[in-house]
Image (cartoon, rainbow, N blue to C red):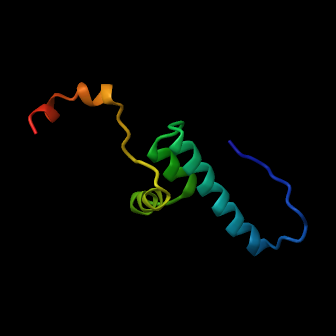
Amino acid sequence: MQISINLPERFSESDLAGLIGEMKLQLALSLFREKRISIAEAMDITGQDINEFLEICRKEGIPIINFSPDDIGKMDFLKEL
C-alpha cells in the first residue's frame, strides 16, 4: 500500500528523503506501540534491522515485550524460576 502526501514546494528533493524516512519511522513506532503491527512489520516499514529498531524503541520508551498479568500467569516455565 502506498500513501501520497502533498508538501509545500519549498521542500527540496534532499529534504524529502529525510522527511520520508522520519515519517516511516514515526508511523512504524506508533503502530508498533499500539500493537497494531509486529516488530517485523515495523522493521519492513522503516528498512531498519532488528538492532537499530530495538535501540530506537529503547530510546522512545516503547516496550518490545508486553505481557498482561494473565499472559504471565499462563507461562508455566516462569513458576520454576
What is the x, y in percent for residue 53? 46, 58
Is 23 situated left or right of 5 in this image?
A: left
The image shows residue 75, relative to residue 13, as above or below, that is above
Q: Residue furthest right?
A: 9
The vertical placement of 55 against 43, above or below, is below
Q: How many marks?
A: 0
Image coordinates of residue 15 in percent, x first then y, are 75, 72
Which quarter of the image is occupied by the N terminus? Answer: top right
**Residue 2 in the figure: left or right of residue 75:** right
- Residue at x 64%, y 62% (from the top left corner): 22
Residue at the spot 42% in from the left edge and 62% down from the top edge? 55
Is 68 or 36 nearer to us in this picture? Answer: 68
Residue 23 location (% of width, % of height): 67, 57
Q: Where does the image place residue 68, in percent across and percent down from the top left? A: 36, 31
| Quarter of the rendering containing residue 8 | bottom right
Quadrant for the C terminus in the image: top left
| Residue drawn at the location 51% of the way across and 44% of the way down | 32
Q: Quadrant of residue 26?
A: bottom right
In the picture, residue 34 is in which quadrant? top right
Left or right: 5 as drawn, with respect to 62: right
Q: Is residue 74 above or below residue 65?
A: above
Given residues 23 and 73, the one toward you in this image is 73
Residue in front for this viewpoint, 24 or 81 = 81
